[in-house]
């Protein structure tokens, strides 16, 4: 899966990089102090679906960090939102396409 070089969250531009899963022992990471999101390189994950889920998961961490700074431990909330968002995107592909077309 091709990942974006940057994601915008609030007023911040977050850099998105490929990383070695072995270096971080995770599929991805979110470095809030550096505004950097890492997603394991292709081949380290099961496929595009896992890469997409990882990107969404780390993006949610960034959103919570920027917009809800009072939440100290956001992992459980992030995991739940990732599942909800990914399920909603998978189940509503026509709506997703229409929204993307409207934003183009």
Image (spheres, rainbow, N blue to C red):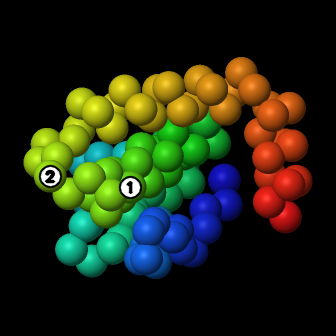
Q: Are marks 2 and 1 in contact (CB under 8 Å)?
A: no
Residue at disc 1, secondary structure: helix
Give the SS element for disc 2. Answer: loop
Q: Position of residue 9 (x, y in %)?
A: 45, 66
- On screen, residue 75 above or below 34: above
Residue under the image location 57 percent in, 74 percent down:
5
Quadrant into which the C terminus falls = bottom right
* Residue 28 appears in view: no
Q: Residue at x 79, y 46 (%)?
A: 99
Q: Nearer the viewer, residue 3 or 91?
A: 91
Mark 1 Cα shell of 10 Å, populated few (<14), some (14-19), many (≥20): some
| In this rendering, position of residue 72 left or right of residue 97 | left
In terms of image quadrants, where is residue 73? top left
Q: Is residue 70 left or right of residue 94?
A: left
Question: Is 97 placed above or below 66 here?
Answer: above
Query: Relative to the observer, which residue lies in front, 68 or 42?
Result: 68
- Residue 64 location, x and y as percent? 31, 51
Residue 93 falls left or right of residue 24: right
> How far across and how far down the image is residue 21, in percent?
35, 53
Q: Which residue is mark 1?
A: 63
Give x and y (percent) for residue 48: 63, 42
Mark 2 or mark 1, whichever is nearer to me:
2
Residue positioned 54% across, 33% down in the render: 85
Residue at the image position 59 percent from the left and 24 percent from the top: 87
Give the residue pinned by disc 2.
Answer: 70
């Amino acid at each position: 899966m091709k990942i974006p070089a940057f994601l915008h969250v609030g007023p911040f531009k977050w850099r998105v990089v490929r990383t070695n899963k072995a270096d971080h022992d995770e599929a991805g990471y979110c470095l809030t102090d550096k505004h950097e999101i890492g997603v394991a390189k292709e081949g380290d994950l099961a496929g595009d679906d896992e890469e997409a889920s990882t990107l969404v998961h780390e993006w949610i961490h960034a959103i919570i960090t920027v917009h809800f700074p009072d939440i100290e431990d956001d992992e459980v909330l992030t995991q739940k939102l990732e599942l909800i968002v990914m399920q909603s995107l998978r189940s509503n592909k026509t709506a997703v396409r229409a929204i993307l077309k409207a934003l183009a």
